Amino acid sequence: MLDVIRARMRQGIRTAAFPPEAVLPERFRGRPVLDPSRCTTACRECAMRAPSAAIRIREDGAPELDLGACLFSPEEALACPAGAIGYTTDYRMAGSSRDALRTTGGKVDLAHALDERSRRLFGRSLKLRSVVAGSCNGCEAELVALGNVVFDLGRFGVQFVASPRHADGIVVTGAVNTNMRLALEKTYAAVPPPKLVIAVGACAISGGPFVGSPEVAGGIGDILPVDLWVPGCPPHPLTTIDGLLRLLGAIEGGKTRGVP
């Protein structure tokens, strides 16, 4: 037992500060960016070569990135031979609307705080129920990581609970296949109002790589009202934390308030 205590004392504090003090490594594929100056007439071919619907051409002919459909894969950047598409190390991407995740350059409209009444209700103790609606379990692994000693989501007053009757909202992951749609709707109905809906990951936001299949929805926005959209495949725990804190009004004007 003494050896365990000594080892723990040597390890020191392992919980990461938020915002993180260290810069994420260069290999981390965070918020994607698009350099329109490098775009050529071959842009339409880029959109067709990409392994997802992250790249599209607008009606005015301008290329656009959809972070909600992005799989954050190297192939999406390589789809453009001119090198117009790349990834930053910025984990901040969560938005309050689906349109906020669509960008012509890479800048996104980050999540806005809830109204004052909702912040009073949820700001000190937010309980969430996870709904896995047809997922590869990548997003769920990152949600589980939120409870470890490094990220420690509980220090912000946010916890996952077992029953929707005890929850303030639901966190939806997965492409919402036909077998899970009814379960998702019943879980949402079981949460007492007022309630929140948080879409986590490309599949929940847009259908991900399965978009267009008759077996999945094109994102839960077609089924439920969504309050927070967290892009990623899967989203990094910091992306989810940042989005939740912005939603709760703990991050305003780029400054963090009352966050340990």
Image (spheres, rainbow, N blue to C red):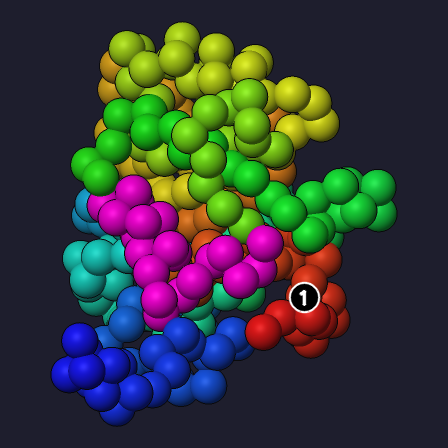
Residue 76: x %, y % from top left: 24, 56
Could you tell me which residue is drawn at 17 percent across and 76 percent down? 1
Could you tell me which residue is drawn at 35 percent across and 42 percent down? 202
* Residue designated by label 1: 251
- Judging from the image, what secondary structure is the residue with disc 1 in? strand
Task: Give residue 184's quadrant in the image.
Answer: top left
Residue 128: x %, y % from top left: 51, 37
| Quadrant showing the C terminus | bottom right
Q: Is residue 155 left or right of residue 123?
A: left
Location of residue 220 with respect to 214 vertically, above or below: below
Residue 66: x %, y % from top left: 43, 48
Q: Give the magenta part as a residue range.
A: 138-157
Could you tell me which residue is drawn at 64 percent across and 58 percent down? 246
Residue type (three-letter) at the residue carrying disc 1: Ile
Magenta includes 143? yes
Location of residue 255 with respect to 159 vertically, above or below: below
Whether residue 152 appears in this view of the structure is: yes
Q: Is residue 200 left or right of residue 77?
A: right
